[in-house]
Image (tube, helix red, strand yellow):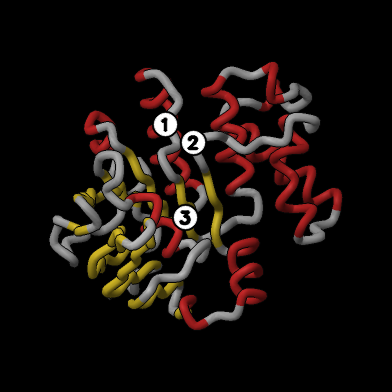
Amino acid sequence: MIEPMVIAANLRKAYRQGPREVVALRDVSFAALPGELVVISGGRGAGKTTLLNQVGGLDRPDSGEVTIAGRRITDLSEGDLLQLRRKEIGYVFPSFGLIPVLTAAENVGVPLRLTNTPVDERDKRVEELLTLVGLADHADRSPYELSEDQRQRIAIARALANRPRLLIADEPTGRLEARSSRRIMELLRTLTLTEDVTALVTTADPALVGYADRVLTLRDGVLSSPRQTWAEPREAS
């Protein structure tokens, strides 16, 4: 039996708004297998970003546990969490987050610099990733010279630079028009196979859920899908 890459167990998270407590996650549990693309769907305020923040170690749940590759990250110190995020998890956000003064290639290489990857190895990996996302001929362009679709492709390449085992993409198509959104989801679908990475992707667009191996639905912080209904990851054709 394949061991899950991600296990979230009974996650609860609440925030204070003045005297009022707002519960963002209510007893959320799920698992994701290695190489699986899991789409977490739901409308605005459903708790999607909050859930990704707990799973990715950007925030801690009020209760519950998260395990990544057999390691319970909710028990880690801040220093150990930082190392985990740098080496094991790649993040993609709707705002792209590219550094304006760096070229596309330099942006992709930032995580490799943070882990002190040798220059030759770093340059080879950057070139490989730019080719994978279809932007090898845009390596020297600045972010402002790229379309929004291209910026997100660069952001995805950067997220994969250190060969993470988990890719977390929070509304990666949120700023894109329909055709570009489909291209990004097709790219994520391909990369889970070629890069051997597990991907958790949130979206509010029901037209995009068909790219997933499995879909989980959040409504008001409650996971409405069954907890353990995953299928075997698809094989590359």
In the picture, measured across the screen, residue 145 lies left or right of residue 201, that is: right
Q: Residue 3 in the image: x percent, y percent?
A: 34, 74
Where residue 104 sits, quadrant-wise, is top right
Read off the residue under disc 3: 197
Q: Residue 207 in the image: x percent, y percent?
A: 24, 29
Q: Callout 3 environment at 10 Å: few (<14), some (14 to 19), or many (20+)?
A: many
Calculate the distance from the C-alpha at mark 1 to the C-alpha at mark 3. 19 Å
Residue at the image point whose x is 39% and y is 40% from the top: 189
Mark whose residue sits in front, 3 or 2:
2
Read off the residue under disc 2: 94
Kind of residue indicated by mark 3: Val
Vertical arrangement, residue 219 with respect to residue 222, above or below = above
Kind of residue indicated by mark 1: Thr
Calculate the distance from the C-alpha at mark 1 to the C-alpha at mark 2. 7 Å
Mark whose residue sits in front, 1 or 3:
1
Residue at the image point whose x is 22% and y is 51% from the top: 218
Kind of residue indicated by mark 2: Pro
Vertical arrangement, residue 189 with respect to residue 181, above or below = below
Residue 120 image label:
none
Q: Callout 1 environment at 10 Å: few (<14), some (14 to 19), or many (20+)?
A: many
Residue 173 image label:
1
Res 2 seen here:
no
